[in-house]
Image: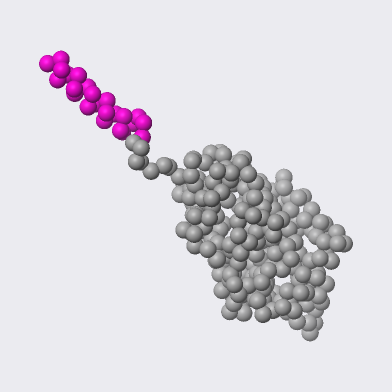
Amino acid sequence: MKKIFLAALTVVCLLLTACGGEKPANEPKSKTKIGIITRLNVSEVEYNKLMTKLEKSYRPSKANLSVEFKFFDKMSDLLAALNAKQVDMIGTYESVADYLIQRNENLEILKSERILHDSFCFGVRSGDTILKKELDKAIKAMQNDGTLADLTKKYIHDLKDSKADPPAVEIPKFDGADTIKVAVTGDLPPLDLILADGTPAGFSTAVLAEIGNRLNKNIELINVDSAARASILSSKGADVVFWVSVPKDSTLVPADVDKPAEIDLSEPYFTDAIVHIAEK
């Protein structure tokens, strides 16, 4: 009888170990889900393979041993997924994180083992070489004369600890002048922002308004979803779209990871750190 009891006890212990104790060796590791805005030139599967190479040095705190990136077309969808626990955190830019945290005290920026950066630029059709040259020249001039620094302070740094919306952007209008159609998404406030009344605003819009003044050209803003940026450009529904690119000195991520072949990018006008935000 004693032997039968010990054998039964052993079976119970094994069952408890499998259910609530140490995990079996073949059980898959849990993953931390990170939501990001959809990348247009790489699939979700391909992007995860790429980022797996960086996991050992690029992992936010509160993340498990491995991460999985999930694509979302809109920032509103990202925030809803975070609230519904469909993702554990959101990957975005530091200025965007500051803006969101000021409006939701339940969010926080997580520490990361390594900080990566992206550069902000304008995307144009590959054949629009004259427009690209004009944008590049204006951006360089704005860097040299301090205009870009002033706009960065006004539309980003001064808003870091404020719940106020960015100042309104005055869009230039010149009688008889050419018009540059610009697609805005509102998915990266305060960089690319659409106010509650539907008015496009934010830092990138302010930069383009200044470029319009310097080129003596009208700026027409068109609201689109983030995932439609490439298609509206190729279909000539817009001449310019807001874009981000990997800095030229980066060796971690291919520079064209999110740039379709038919799109050329202007000189960068702003660089921001990639951070992760989660609920406290």
Q: Residue furthest left?
A: 1
Q: Report which quarter residue 209 is drawn in.
A: bottom right
> Looking at the picture, does residue 239 appear above or below residue 55?
below
Across and down, in percent, residue 106 comes to 58, 41
**Residue positioned most to the right:** 145
Q: In the image, is 151 to the left or to the right of 79?
A: right
> Does the stretch in magenta take in 22?
yes
- Return the residue found at the far top: 2
Residue at 78%, 77% (x, y): give it.
Answer: 217
- Verify whether residue 97 appears in magenta: no
Part of the protein shown in magenta: 1-23
Q: As displayed, is residue 208 above or below residue 253?
A: below
Residue 97 place in picture, x, y as percent: 64, 49
In this rendering, does residue 199 appear at all?
no
Toward the viewer: 191 or 250?
250
Q: Nearer the viewer, residue 68 or 216?
A: 68
Residue 142, percent from left and from top: 83, 64
Pick the residue in front: 109 or 193: 109
Q: Quadrant of the N terminus?
A: top left
Determine the main secondary structure of the stretch shown in magenta.
Answer: helix
**Which residue does the image show at 74% across and 53% down from the upper left?**
156
**Which corner quadrant holds the C terminus?**
top right
Whether residue 255 can be seen here: yes
Please state the horizontal and vertical placement of residue 119, each as a whole percent of the image. Answer: 69, 58
- Number of marks drawn: 0
- Rendered residue at 76%/74% (across/down): 133
Judge left or right: residue 114 versus residue 210.
Answer: left
